[in-house]
Amino acid sequence: MYKNYLNLIVILNDYIRGTVSNEETFWSRLEEELDNTVAISTAKLDVPLNEKLRELNTELVIQNANWGKLSEYKTISFLQDPFFEMKKIFEPFWLKMRLKIRKRESIDDKIKLQLESLKDSIKITNSNFMAKMYEKAGKFQVISMGVDHELFKPLNKERLRRKYNLPQNKKIKIFVGSTHKIKGFEIIKKMISEDTSSFWILVLKDTDIGPGHNFITFTKISQPTLVELYNCADLFVSRSLVESFGLAAVEAMFCDLPVDTTKTGVFWDWEPNMNNPREEVMKKGFDKNTWMNNWKNLVKQNISSTI
């Protein structure tokens, strides 16, 4: 179908859409927004990748830097996983696990693949925090992630609290992430146990821990439901040890929700005052239009001609 296209851009990741609820991702958004583009889920590919790329008459590849060097084609490698920082935090844990499970992929293996991908590629990442962390790999262009500002927006709090049977007269805080240590979930649990005057919404993508006396849990929900839950809350709380960007916090701000987050990702060198969260993230250029325009300009600069 695509073999007669000129200047075809191929997007490569293990999965193009999210595995929680087939949700939109960075990769699916690129496929939708860029011209002359096809996205390939390498986890589902049933022919050799190089054979497929030749068939498609590929000019430019955009790939996840996590997978190493995937082809000889001109490549934009997008780096979004902070393995260098994770190694500092979790190296003793990883080493212990390697002793228990032979052939387990170590964090050093993951970093090696990232550096292999970045070596001869156009290097893109999503925050100054990441560019600084990986500065030994060379100079990066930073293109911040973008949020669908038409979906993530303020809604009626009172109505939504009634819909989800949440307290109307308590301060509600929301955590969005997973139970993984990197997300600081142990810290969040301690905060919940000590903060008895507040009610908490936990939106988890991995484990349903059930409700508690002052919290309720949601797992694997759709993005429209997530928007409604942000709008039930008075404050977004994150205690992540490291983030490459901090997407959940930015989504919350687009819902005009103040955030209390650690200094990581975009918040490493940006301190919004939270007087008008939605306006602040719009001015910062974290909306979907700015995000995609930056990617379109990057691609335009790196293809030889247009159809």
Image (tube, rainbow, N blue to C red):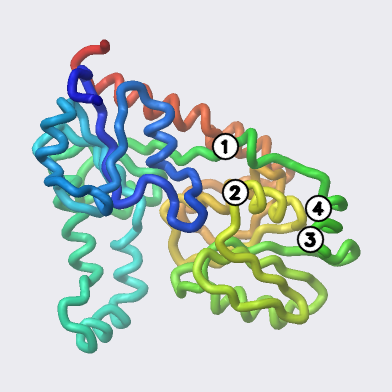
The secondary structure type at the circle numbered 2 is helix
Q: Amino acid at mark 1?
A: Asp
Disc with the residue nearer the chain's start (3 vs 1): 1
Q: Residues within 10 Å of mark 3 (few under 14, many from 20)?
A: few
Disc with the residue nearer the chain's start (3 vs 2): 3
Disc with the residue nearer the chain's start (4 vs 2): 4
Q: Quadrant of residue 50?
A: top left
Left-right relation of 96 to 185: left
At horizontal 70% and vertical 55% (from top left) the residue drawn is 229
Left-right relation of 60 to 271: left
Instruction: Indicate which disc residue 223 carries.
Output: 2
The reply to whether dot 4 and dot 3 touch (C-beta < 8 Å) is yes
Q: Nearer the viewer, mark 3 or mark 1?
A: 3
Q: Residues within 10 Å of mark 4 (few under 14, many from 20)?
A: some
Disc with the residue nearer the chain's start (4 vs 1): 1
Q: Nearer the viewer, mark 4 or mark 1?
A: 4
Q: Amino acid at mark 2?
A: Gln
Q: Which residue in the protein does label 3 denote? A: 164
The secondary structure type at the circle numbered 4 is helix
Measure the alpha-carbon separation of dots 2 and 1: 10 Å
